Amino acid sequence: MSKTTFQQKTKLMAKLFDSGCNTEKKLQQLDMESILKIPGITIPDMALIIELQKETKANKLFSYLGGGTDEQSGT
């Protein structure tokens, strides 16, 4: 997957917030049916939502949004 810019990430987050998805829990609960109901959603947005879900679950969302990496393992 190509590098996503911070601007692309924030635009998607605005779409998510506008649709009522404003917490990590709500983000994790999004399924494909719910994602498709978000106004203006695109296929690249869908891929980015999956990335956001993955990074949130791994507690690395801030690093992901900032473009950094956190290579610490959770062991």
Image: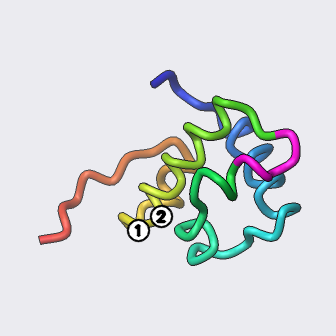
Q: Residues within 10 Å of mark 2 (few under 14, many from 20)?
A: some
As shown in the figure, which amino acid type bears the numbered disc 1? Answer: Asn
Q: Do the residues under discs 2 and 1 have CB atoms within 8 angstroms? A: yes
Q: Position of residue 1 (x, y in %)?
A: 45, 25
Numbered tag placed on residue 56 in the rendering: 2
Left or right relative to 41: residue 75: left
Q: In the orientation shown, which residue stands out farthest toward the left?
A: 75
Numbered tag placed on residue 4 in the rendering: none
Q: In the orientation shown, which residue stands out farthest toward the top?
A: 2
Asked where in the image residue 43 lies, by quadrant, the reply is: top right
Magenta span of residues = 36-40
Q: Residues within 10 Å of mark 1 (few under 14, many from 20)?
A: few
- Quadrant position of the C terminus in the picture: bottom left
Which residue position holds label 1? Answer: 59
As shown in the figure, which amino acid type bears the numbered disc 2? Answer: Thr
> Element at badge 2?
helix
What residue is shown at x 42% (from left), y 55% (from top)? 54
Mark 2–mark 1 Cα distance, whole angstroms, equals 5 Å
* Magenta part, dominant SS: loop
| Vertical side of 75 occupied by 62: above or below | above
Q: In the orientation shown, which residue stands out farthest toward the front?
A: 33
